[in-house]
Image (cartoon, rainbow, N blue to C red):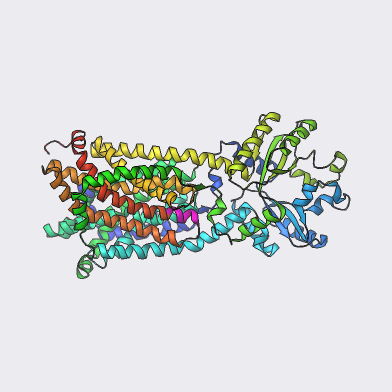
Amino acid sequence: MKKFSKFISNHNILILIVSILLLIPSIYFYLNTRINYDILVYLPEKIDTIKGQNILANDFGLGSYAYVMIDTKDEYKLSKMEDNIRDIKGVNEVISIYDLIGTTIPKDMLPDKVIDKLYDDNTTIMMVTFKKNTSDDETIEAVRSLREEVGDASRVSSMTSMVIDTMDLSDSEMLTYIVIAVILCLIVLTFATDSYIIPGLLLLNIGMAIVYNMGTNIFFGQISYITKAIVAVLQLGVTTDFSIFLYHKYMMAKGKMKDKKEAMASAIKDTFQSVIGSSLTTFVGFLALCTMDLTLGTDIGLVMSKGVLFGLICVMTVFPALLLTFDNLIEKTEHKKLFPEFKKIQEFSLKFYKILFVVFILLMIPAYIGNKSYDVYYKLDDSLPSDLPFHVANSELANRFGIKSAEIAIINKNIKQSRVEELVDELKDVKGIDMVLAPNTLVSEDVKDLLPKEALDIIDNDKYQLIIMNSNYEIASTKLNKQVVQVEDIIKKYDSKGIVAGEGALMKDLVTIADHDFHMVNYTSIAVIFIVMLLVLKSIGLPIVLIIAIEFAIFANMACAYFTGTKLPFVASIVVGTIQLGATIDYAILMSTKYLEERHNKKREKHKAMEKTLKNTVPSIITSALCFFAATIGVGLYTKIDMIGSICNLLARGSIISMLVVILVLPALLMIFDKFIMKTTRFKEGK
């Protein structure tokens, strides 16, 4: 590390040149990294519903579909529009009521349920199927073209429409996220540091680390829009304290050494030794998200852990180069620190530590209850504004035509017609299903021969046949999830390899997997962070105490949602706890390692040791927490996408709660369990 530190200190200009040149490919890769806006694609490939989606796409050309509401019953206009839509790249088939009846079949020969779903007063429903999946680029462009052809985006209802509206809204907000986070962090850092130029250099350093991180995402193929939206602000909030720590070490070393390059070499060495443990806990904490079956966790976890790594690398290389290059300007713009030393908080924490411990024990009860009881929603469109075109289309489709959620059963082609009829009859009896269509029961065999081939190909081929059901229940509702299970049981009676696909089935699996992921991620993050702290701190007792403190902060944070009646998107409920644990455990590590140093190395009794610890760590902890808060709160309050807003608001609140727990509760835990901690900690020889 000594040789590395000296190299960085002696080649600051070279390092800046190389780091600036590296920004060029990073920006290019960042701009060319595909962003995915469909969370359902992160469901595991092994589940039946995804296998069913693949069959629909590959065997039926039903990768996705859209309902189009046309305000006319003029057959000529409809026919012309159908022709135009068929010419759109990516469109597979276009079917309306007039395709079914044509000029040879009386409308009365089709089931009333079919007529009700396709025709109402002066509005005709047209079904458009696409060759590829919902979030495929070709399908997205096809639906954009379809909206233009129809002339009103709110007349096209499809999952792809939701993806498009999410994409447009997210992209329009992205730059504002960064601007808000930077401005708020600049304010905090101006108060926390003693030079007007340092906040700018610090944010420039972190900004470069963010660009490197986002640029290297191209090697993943794509990232989710949630990852893109939150990673920059989280990386800013999580890695800021690394830079502040190096700056403080550098200023201290400058006071002892005449040569600023030697001072910087010393600062780099000391900073690396001090932050490697805390950065490692944050790194593995984010990696714990990779244990989710919903691979969105892997997406966020890999990008965030990579962000911590790039943040650490830039703090050890780019930031020292910036400090040395602009050292004279830093000195000229020095000012008195505007942040107070928070002595009153330190005195309060030390004086009333026993009372604070009792309060901590009492608050555990409501925190635990609230953490277990807050409401979660899974319906993806609930996280978006209700005035978006896809929302308007979905509402009208549901209210006027009763089309809410389609379930598609895929069964073997060779099942006898009599058995299919029995299956259809049984499905019709399922509560909440108001329409069941199968190729052999749609019309009589004689009439079936008169139907256009493209209409039959949608539900029948040489390997499979489809049974299409419409449910009255809302997507992702408890009623629909139970209904899907009931339908699956019925289908399996007639075809053991039968599959229930469609949006309703996908959302049911999403709910099941998300519930599993919530527990898996929480347990994994606690376990891996405990192991890292065990190895870094050389203690058994201390990691237990620290995790208890931060887990309490997480429980209290999530409990706020319960006591305020806030309903959270399921993604936020899964990832926030792990992110808060990985990001804010650093506060606890900083305080506890300083306390052990005072207790063991300097042989101070526990009260005096804690007094010194609080004096040395509270300002740093408050600064780090406020930077994290500043980076996330602005985005949380500004964004119209609740999936992003909820995550940022929870993390902003979580940073403050973790800060308060570390400053007020952790000192009490360290002193009360002092003997246990000291006996279960291995100290270095000679200390």
Left or right: residue 438 compared with residue 102? left
Q: Is residue 112 above or below residue 200?
A: above
Q: Is residue 350 magenta?
A: no
State the residue lying farthest toward the bottom.
332
Q: Is residue 645 magenta?
A: yes
**Residue drawn at point x = 66 percent, y = 36 percent:** 487
Left or right: residue 262 compared with residue 201? left
Quadrant housing residue 363: top left
Report the magenta stretch's main SS: helix
Considering depth in this image, is 528 or 382 the residue closer to the camera? 382
Q: Is residue 607 above or below residue 14?
A: above
Q: Position of residue 227 (x, y in %)?
A: 46, 52
Q: Position of residue 160 (x, y in %)?
A: 61, 53
Magenta segment: 640-647
Left or right: residue 46 compared with residue 59? left
Considering depth in this image, is 563 or 553 the residue closer to the camera? 563
Left or right: residue 686 compared with residue 363? left
Q: Position of residue 30 (x, y in %)?
A: 45, 56
Considering depth in this image, is 641 or 63 the residue closer to the camera? 641
Whether residue 317 can be seen here: no
**Residue drawn at point x = 66 percent, y = 55 percent:** 157
Q: Position of residue 97 (x, y in %)?
A: 79, 53
Quadrant housing residue 648: bottom left
